[in-house]
Image: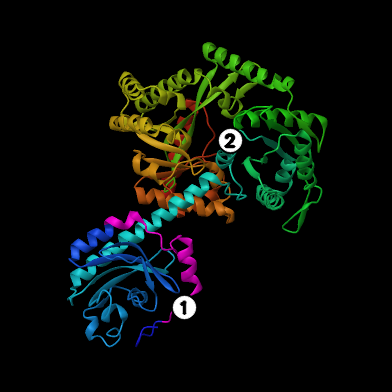
């Protein structure tokens, strides 16, 4: 303890937790703060400036200039005294201050005389450290100096908060937010690491028989809780070299490194299946589901994770044919599934030639008064035998075909033409248009958009082009250049399904994004207090921080709409406001919404 000081060396649990939460409790230097301390030192013309983190026993200097040490004991460092102050804590002359005149830093070593430090108060309200300046000579510190130091301290805090958000988004990019299990991205990284070293690996793919019944009988909240319980039980029983990941929905996969013998893979699969013998207790309710398992083994069934998962999926299909609880291994003749996919590709090519594709439009509503302000163009397939097909029935296959670029260009032309028609009819709606990844492979995308706008006489700000996170992070430089050219035309750029892919804050910083679209999976449970509420809240905060508007997809209830409106979400779309419909039906929806908006404002 410092002589004459009332500061106690222990730090409360909340502060320790805050330091741990921000991952700043070690002595490793943080280069991203270097420019701030250099600026601070130059601004105040002092001998040294530091960003300090004050732990129970040690003060870590995460960034410093003019100082050779990277840490100091808490009971000696001046920074500990600044933590309980609202504003800057100033020692004009330590040699004349009874509380500090005998401090080792004053009478020996650097022989400090002056100190000024501002506390770094993070979003939780906890103070985790300081931005401080020191000098060997006494100094006066004016009110202007205090204000400048506080402003610089806030810059440090802002960067700390952004970095935490980046870390959280990185976690979302690699882990399933519902179960906490690795997601497809992390699974691919781990599997690719194993396969790149030529080590064998077993892939066990399974989903849940009876899960739909749980959702139908008990509701989706109970279904989500069941998925979490399954993930917790199975992950607790994994052995070394095994990874359990959730691919989406009720589909899971286990990869087991160094497994080449089918008999060993069968033992793993049987153990995995036996984990379902006991029911799962969720909210005092015992739920029982079963599973079938499909198995593929490298290198016999493939040497890439995508191919192995594909072959395990074919084996899973065969296991399901055998009945509940079955296990099946991939065999080459199962490739008839691939032939079926090729048949669908042939049908898609014929559908485009025959004009079987249609563009439907889903209204987008300003939440503050429920006025229809836009419509998203959505692709549909009028199949001659199966009727109107939604994208989930064909889009995953179409996206991988060269045909995607041609279909995307057709949708672009149709949607812009429709925007012109609505404008001529006195309905100046903004039209959102989804872009295929293949469209970005063309360097002339911006030129094509410009010509299409000119041909139909549509103002650029009436069009908003949408891309998914996964498109955004591929070939980033080329994508940025294309988007920059598009934005220069005046069209809006929306980042679709935000929070579900690989994007980080760097995408928001580097890309000319004008709108974030919250994925429907996050909206579904926001009104029942799930973790998804925090995710949506964070996305809204990011939108405000980066100056972009936010639209929420998948609004199905008035409760969800009210929650989003109260949180400051700008716009929304979903079944609550209207299903995707033909252009003529949009006009009726707009008219009805105008009447509602008039009553709203009355």
Question: In which quadrant of the rendered view does residue 336 lie?
Answer: top right
Whole-number angstrom distance, CA of label 1 to CA of label 2: 48 Å
Residue 269 position in % (x across, y down): 76, 40
Residue 139 to residue 150: above or below: below
Residue in front for this viewpoint, 590 or 304: 304
* Towards the viewer: 167 or 408: 167
Where residue 520 sits, quadrant-wise, is: top right
Q: Residue at x 72, y 33 (%)?
A: 295
Viewer-closest of 579 and 433? 433
- What is the x, y in percent for residue 494? 41, 37
Of mark 1 and mark 2, the one earlier in the sequence is 1
Characterize the local packing of mark 2: few (<14), some (14-19) or many (20 or more) Cα atoms within 10 angstroms: few
Q: Position of residue 184 (x, y in %)?
A: 58, 39
The residue pinned by badge 2 equals 197
Residue beneath label 1, please?
Answer: 10
Q: Is residue 1 above or below residue 142?
A: below
Q: What is the x, y in percent for residue 551? A: 44, 43
Which region is colored magenta?
Answer: 8-35
> In the structure shown, which secondary structural element does the residue marked by tag 2 occupy?
loop
Whether 29 is among the magenta residues is yes
* Magenta stretch: includes residue 415: no
Q: Residue furthest front?
A: 109
Q: Secondary structure at mark 1?
A: loop
Residue located 45% across and 49% down the image: 539
- Tags 1 and 2 touching, CB below 8 Å: no
């Amino acid at each position: 303890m410092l002589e004459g000081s009332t500061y106690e060396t222990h730090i409360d649990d909340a502060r320790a937790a805050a330091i741990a939460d921000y991952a700043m409790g070690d002595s490793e230097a943080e280069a991203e703060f270097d420019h701030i301390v250099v600026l601070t030192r130059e601004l105040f013309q002092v001998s040294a400036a530091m960003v300090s983190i004050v732990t129970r026993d040690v003060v870590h200097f995460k960034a410093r200039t003019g100082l050779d040490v990277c840490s100091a004991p808490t009971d000696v460092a001046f920074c500990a005294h600044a933590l309980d102050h609202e504003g800057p804590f100033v020692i004009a002359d330590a040699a004349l201050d009874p509380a500090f005149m005998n401090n080792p830093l004053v009478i020996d070593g650097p022989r400090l005389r002056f100190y000024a430090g501002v506390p770094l108060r993070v979003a939780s309200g906890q103070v985790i450290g300081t931005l401080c300046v020191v000098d060997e000579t006494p100094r006066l510190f004016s009110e202007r100096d205090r204000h400048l130091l506080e402003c610089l301290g806030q810059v440090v805090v802002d960067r700390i908060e952004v970095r935490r958000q980046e870390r959280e988004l990185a976690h979302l990019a690699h882990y399933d937010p519902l179960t906490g299990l690795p997601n497809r991205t992390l699974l691919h990284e781990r599997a690719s690491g194993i396969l790149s070293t030529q080590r064998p690996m077993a892939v066990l793919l399974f989903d849940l028989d009876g899960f739909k019944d749980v959702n139908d009988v008990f509701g989706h909240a109970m279904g989500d809780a069941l998925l979490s319980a399954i993930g917790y039980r199975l992950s607790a029983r994994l052995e070394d070299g095994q990874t359990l990941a959730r691919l989406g929905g009720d589909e899971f996969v286990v990869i087991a490194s160094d497994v080449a013998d089918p008999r060993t893979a069968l033992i793993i699969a049987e153990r995995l299946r036996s984990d379902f013998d006991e029911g799962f207790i969720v909210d005092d309710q015992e739920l029982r589901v079963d599973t079938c398992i499909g198995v593929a083994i490298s290198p016999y069934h493939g040497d890439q994770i995508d191919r192995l998962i594909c072959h395990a999926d074919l084996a899973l299909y065969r296991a399901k044919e055998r009945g509940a609880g079955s296990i099946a291994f991939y065999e080459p003749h199962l490739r008839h599934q691939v032939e079926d996919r090729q048949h669908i590709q042939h049908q898609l090519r014929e559908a485009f030639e025959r004009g079987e594709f249609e563009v439907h439009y889903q209204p987008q509503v300003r939440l503050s008064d429920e006025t229809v302000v836009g419509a998203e163009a959505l692709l549909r397939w009028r199949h001659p035998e199966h009727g109107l097909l939604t994208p989930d029935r064909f889009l995953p296959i179409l996206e991988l075909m060269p045909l995607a670029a041609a279909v995307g260009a057709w949708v672009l032309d149709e949607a812009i033409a429709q925007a012109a028609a609505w404008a001529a009819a006195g309905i100046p709606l903004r039209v959102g248009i989804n872009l295929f990844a293949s469209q970005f492979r063309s360097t002339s995308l911006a030129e094509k958009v410009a010509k299409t706008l000119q041909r139909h006489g549509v103002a650029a700000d009436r069009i908003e082009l949408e891309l998914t996170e996964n498109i955004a992070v591929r070939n980033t430089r080329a994508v940025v250049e294309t988007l920059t050219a598009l934005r220069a035309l005046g069209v809006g750029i929306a980042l679709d399904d935000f929070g579900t892919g690989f994007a980080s804050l760097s995408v928001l910083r580097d890309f000319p994004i004008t709108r974030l679209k919250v994925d429907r999976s996050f909206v579904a449970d926001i009104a029942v207090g799930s973790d998804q509420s925090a995710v949506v809240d964070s996305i809204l905060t990011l939108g405000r921080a980066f100056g972009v508007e936010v639209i929420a997809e998948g609004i199905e209830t008035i409760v969800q709409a009210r929650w989003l409106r109260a949180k400051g979400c700008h716009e929304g779309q979903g079944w609550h406001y209207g299903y995707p419909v033909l252009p003529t039906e949009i006009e009726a929806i707009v008219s009805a919404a105008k009447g509602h908006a008039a009553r709203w404002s009355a």
